[in-house]
Amino acid sequence: MIEEFNLTGKVAIVTGGIGRGIAIGLARAGADIVIAARNEEKTGRVIDEIIGSGRHGRGIRCDVQSRDDIQTTVDTTLKEFGRLDILVNNAGISAGGPPQSIPEETWDRVVDTNLKSAFLFSQAVYPALVESGGGKIINIGSEYSIFGSASVLPYSVSKGGVIQLTKSLAVAWAGDNIQVNTIIPGWIRTDMTAPVIDNEPFYKGIVQRTPAGRFAEPEEMAGTAVFLASAASDFITGQSIVFDGGYSIA
């Protein structure tokens, strides 16, 4: 049964954000990894870990708001690795404020980074996935994919859109043997949640609401990602798997 989760011979592109834990998890399952992100120093550290685990790794500087950067990332991956099987659309930013005073440029920046980039990257990898005989696209949502937010409205809207993008691509590409699913992470220790953790009353409120009683570590997402990237999930598509320690059901 363990062979169903084996990613040996597969090649994955993982975009920034909380992608470290996912990228290393996919590598440990056997995949070679390309990390597409703007922070070259951080990317380099992760690539060193991947290479240290015995897999091939490559960092490519990529602004996910740029169609040209996205296409260059895909082209470089195919040139250096010869194939592409997995895409993890993970890059994301958050911003907000009172909805009545959110600047248009803030809205555009958040929606373009969190939602439009997932669409553009999926479009760009589609021919390569078809060439490989099928593949996996894993989008990263948020608790705000399913909850409303008065304080980070553009983020909430963009992450809600990720779920609909997932469903629509899953329907459109099922005939090409491409499965598209979303992971909805809850509260995880990342750079983005650091201000929340530093706000002790808010942090305690989240922990108390979470049945698991804690924030997750980024590495803990690896198992869910490996499952959705592997043959074990070949008959699962258009779904959202909530990874939140029970926060959304409490």
Image (cartoon, grey):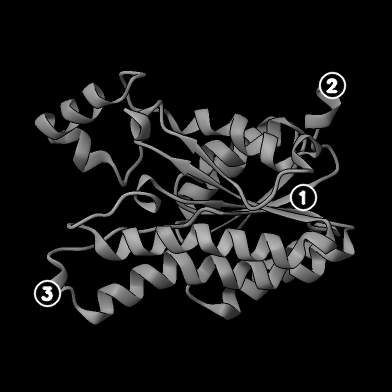
Quarter where residue 28 is shown: top right
Three-letter amino acid code at the position of disc 2: Met
Tell me what residue is drawn at x 53 percent, y 36 percent. 21
Q: Nearer the viewer, mark 3 or mark 1?
A: 3
Q: Position of residue 109 (x, y in %)?
A: 34, 73
Residue at the disc numbered 2: 1
Quarter where residue 131 is shown: bottom right
Tell me what residue is drawn at x 23 percent, y 58 percent. 152
240 displayed left or right of 137 = left
Q: Which mark is residue 101?
A: 3
Q: Does residue 212 lie above or below 234 as drawn?
A: above
Residue at the disc numbered 1: 11
Location of the C terminus by quadrant is top left
Element marked by disc 3: helix
157 displayed left or right of 172 = left
- Badge 1: few (under 14), some or many (20 or more) residues near its Cα, within 10 Å? many
Location of the N terminus by quadrant is top right
Element marked by disc 2: loop
